[in-house]
Image (cartoon, rainbow, N blue to C red):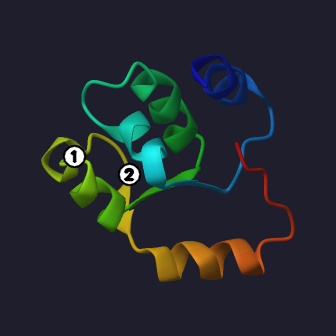
Amino acid sequence: MKSYLQSLSEAETVPTQLLFFNRGAFLTNQAANTLADLQQLAEKGTTIQTCGACLDFYHLTDTLAIGSITNMYEIVETMNQAAKVITL
């Protein structure tokens, strides 16, 4: 996942949004080795959101280091409205 996010951050075209849920919540916390890449993406305009229930479940809410907290309803709505969705 680290390599994917690094490559994505170096691409000319970046995604408009990245949504993290389930164990993906670990990728946006203070201890994640993906923060520099996510920061580059955010600086290029990518919106980064993490599921709040997932953060709560894994006790990560206080360690969220990038992006904002959302909920699964918003994640589903965003994915349903997107022209293209890539899931990993």
- At label 1, the amino acid type is Leu
Report the residue at 61% width, 77% height from top.
76
Q: Which residue is mark 1?
A: 60
Q: Is residue 52 above or below residue 88?
A: below
Q: Position of residue 33 (x, y in %)?
A: 40, 18
**Of 52 and 16, the residue lying toward us:** 52
Taking the view exactly as shown, the residue that stands out farthest to the left is 62
Report the residue at 41% width, 74% height from top.
71
Q: Position of residue 65 (x, y in %)?
A: 27, 40
Name which of mark 1 and mark 2 comes first in the sequence. 1
Q: Residue 53 vs residue 79: left or right?
A: left
Q: Residue 15 vs residue 17: left or right?
A: right
- At label 2, the amino acid type is Gly
Q: Is residue 16 above or below residue 76?
A: above
Taking the view exactly as shown, the residue that stands out farthest to the right is 83
Taking the view exactly as shown, the residue that stands out farthest to the front is 57
Q: Which residue is mark 2?
A: 67
**Rounded to the nearest whole Å, what is the CA distance between mark 1 and mark 2?**
13 Å
Task: Estimate how packed mark 1 is, as few (under 14), some (14 to 19) or many (20 or more) residues with alpha carbons within 10 Å.
Answer: some
Q: Position of residue 16 (x, y in %)?
A: 67, 56
Secondary structure of the residue carrying numbered label 2: loop
Q: Is residue 11 above or below residue 62?
A: above
Report the residue at 27% width, 24% height from top.
31
**Number of dots carrying numbers:** 2
Task: Estimate how packed mark 2 is, as few (under 14), some (14 to 19) or many (20 or more) residues with alpha carbons within 10 Å.
Answer: some
For the residues bearing labels 1 and 2, Cβ distance under 8 angstroms: no
Task: Pick the quarter of the image with the N terminus.
Answer: top right
Secondary structure of the residue carrying numbered label 1: loop
